[in-house]
Image: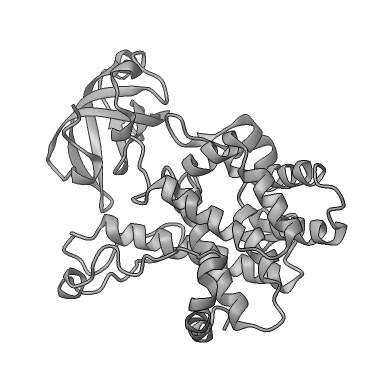
Amino acid sequence: MKRMYIDGIREKDKVEDTFLVTKKESGMSKSGKAYLNLKLMDRTGDIDARVWDNVDVLSGRFNKNDFVRIKGFGVSYQSNIQVNVVDLEMIPQADIDLSDFLPASERDPDRMLEELDAIIDGLKNHHLKGLLKSIFTDREVRRLFKTAPAAKKMHHSYIGGLLEHVLSLCGLVKMAAGHYRNINADLIIAGAILHDIGKIYELSYDKAFDYTDEGRLLGHITIGVEVIEKEIAKIPDFPKRVSILLKHMLLSHHGYLEFGSPKRPKTVEAVILYYCDDLDSKVQSLQALIEKERDTDSNWTSYHRLYERYIYKGDQAERKDIPKDSGKDTEIKGDKEKDKDKDKEKGKGKELNLFK
């Protein structure tokens, strides 16, 4: 049974437990001494590790994506905790409980799928509704979609993360569509649901989070467009214009060519989707960082290399008064509940201003 988790490792701690190796690289110190550079993972996160002694022998005992039981100790390096490994042995996967090693959404995946089905049922455009039902009644797609992370590392990087991200994004675009005039709400919701559909094939997540060959060679945007085209071909008289507008949302949802979008957003709906997607991914990643360092003494997080800044957490007294799950409500209701909430939702929409 696993007893020690990564989020509990501190400087000078004795570390003796099993972890998943997600990175294994050879290195050479300035003095010419060989070492191993490892990344260890469990459900609470990941941590850098180093093997400085007996490198050849220990390296021969395991490969990347193996489970290893290590003996070592925690050290502080550049304001982060690392593990210095002094001994290790590979552990057969048959002896492993994967729930100890892959982080997962706190939300129930079947409940989230029910919410997604309700959103699809609530669409008025029968072509878009038919397309989405065709995709999400496929048993394999449903299984993968409720399991996949939204990313390998950046945001919602846990089992069920893609579905959680999509539901949150649907909430954002729905409010934006209610706030601005002349927005095709069904189109933008369909785009939110399908924008990352290619990630169910781009990423692998049966042991560790990584990219498939298909994912590295094509990417989730190309894969997603292929999924849509394949399903549209099964629907008689699907409007070509709707097909083009929907595929444009997938092709442009990263916003800029340098961020991987083959096209920049050129419709209002595509612009809204891009900004809402960017907002949801960034807020979740920052909240995850704050939560990870919730119990540290500083009012600031450690330096975030991607955002190139420290993030203010608030003082400790303030943080103790904020529930961990405050603000979590991403459920989108189906048609039966729309009427009674219509006025309430319009009021919320008028408070939203995402695009200053």
Residue at screen point 85% across, 61% down: 241
In the image: residue 87, left or right of residue 183 = left
Quadrant housing the C terminus: bottom right
Residue at screen point 27% across, 67% down: 300
Quadrant of the rendered image containing residue 69: top left
From the top left corner, tell me how far across and down residue 164 is, in percent: 46, 54
From the top left corner, tell me how far across and down residue 272 is, in percent: 63, 71
Quadrant of the rendered image containing residue 10: top left
249 shown above or below 172: above
Quadrant of the rendered image containing residue 355: bottom right
The residue positioned farthest toward the front in the image shown = 336
347 shown above or below 9: below
The number of numbered discs placed on residues in the rendered structure image is 0
Of the pair 161 and 151, the residue shown nearer to us: 161
Residue at screen point 28% across, 18% down: 95
Of the pair 353 and 136, the residue shown nearer to us: 136
For the question of whether residue 290 can be seen, the reply is: yes
In the image: residue 223, left or right of residue 41 = right
From the top left corner, tell me how far across and down residue 301 is, in percent: 29, 63
Q: Is the image coloured rainbow, by chain, by secondary structure, or in one colour?
A: one colour
From the top left corner, tell me how far across and down residue 239 is, in percent: 85, 58
In the image: residue 187, left or right of residue 147 = right
